[in-house]
Amino acid sequence: MITGKPLYTVEQIQQRVKEMAGQISKDYEGEELLSVGILRGSFMFFSDIVKLIRVPMNIDFLIASSYVKTHSTGKIKLHADIREDIKGRHVLLIEDIVDTGLTLAYIREMLLARKPASLKICTFLDKKSRREVDVPLDYVGFEIPNKYVVGYGLDCENKFRNLPYIVVFKKSS
Ligand code: IMP
Ligand code: MG
């Protein structure tokens, strides 16, 4: 069940994405970037933010999952890897939400082993109070309370990803 008003409206999201893209463009000035989206959740955020980042860029994606319904299984499954060779390149990982941190910690270790010139993490949402492992987050859109949210790419059982805003989801039982 979707509850009440959006936690973040389309306008609030667009404003924040613009600010984040501005910061990233400044930080990577003079460099070339490889933006890696973590699917499926990040697809909407990814496409919004890359449009506003003003540095030369390549893009790639990987597919990972750890959630069943509204709970993290703690076990990360890599369904598809990136295709680019990242050795010596500046990589920016783009994620929808960081919760326990297990997914990103796993992906980060895997990519760092391939020796990129740098690896930074950009996440739209941060559920910091739920963190189980430490992951350094370089760009965070919004820090949110411990609530399950959907929309703007985020799902519950692969539904609601197409909502253009973020809203709290409650189990109807
Ligand atoms: P972590 O490994 O616990 O940090 O989980 C990260 C992944 O779980 C995210 O990439 C999301 O796909 C999913 N996730 C965590 N919290 C939520 C939520 O509130 N709504 C939808 N998906 C979530
Ligand atoms: Mg995700």
Image (spheres, helix red, strand yellow):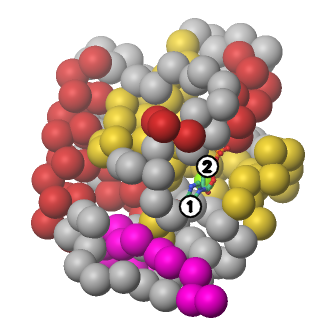
Residue 109 seen in this snapshot? yes
Q: Is mark 1 within 8 Å of ligand 2?
A: yes
Q: Position of residue 73 (x, y in %)?
A: 81, 53
- Location of residue 63 with respect to 101 vertically, above or below: below
> Which residue is depicted at the point 58% across and 81% down?
171
Residue for point 40% across, 71% down:
168
Instruction: State whether residue 44 is above or below residue 55.
Output: below
Q: For the residue carrying disc 2, how many other residues have a C-alpha within 10 Å: few (<14), some (14-19), or many (20+)?
A: many
Secondary structure, mark 1, is loop
State the residue position of label 2. Answer: 38
Q: Quadrant of the C terminus?
A: bottom right
The answer to whether residue 164 is magenta is: yes
Task: For ligand 2, tell me if the residue under mark 2 lies within 8 Å.
Answer: yes
Amino acid type at circle 2 is Ile
**Among the 4 quarters of the image, the one containing residue 3:** bottom left
Residue range of the region highlighted in magenta in the rendering: 161-173
| Left or right of residue 81, residue 88 in this image | left
Position of residue 153 measured from the top left corner of the image (x, y, whole percent): 48, 67
Residue 124 in the image: state x and y as whole percent.
39, 47
Q: How far apart, in angstroms, are the residues tagged by discs 2 and 1?
A: 7 Å
Tag 1 residue: 41
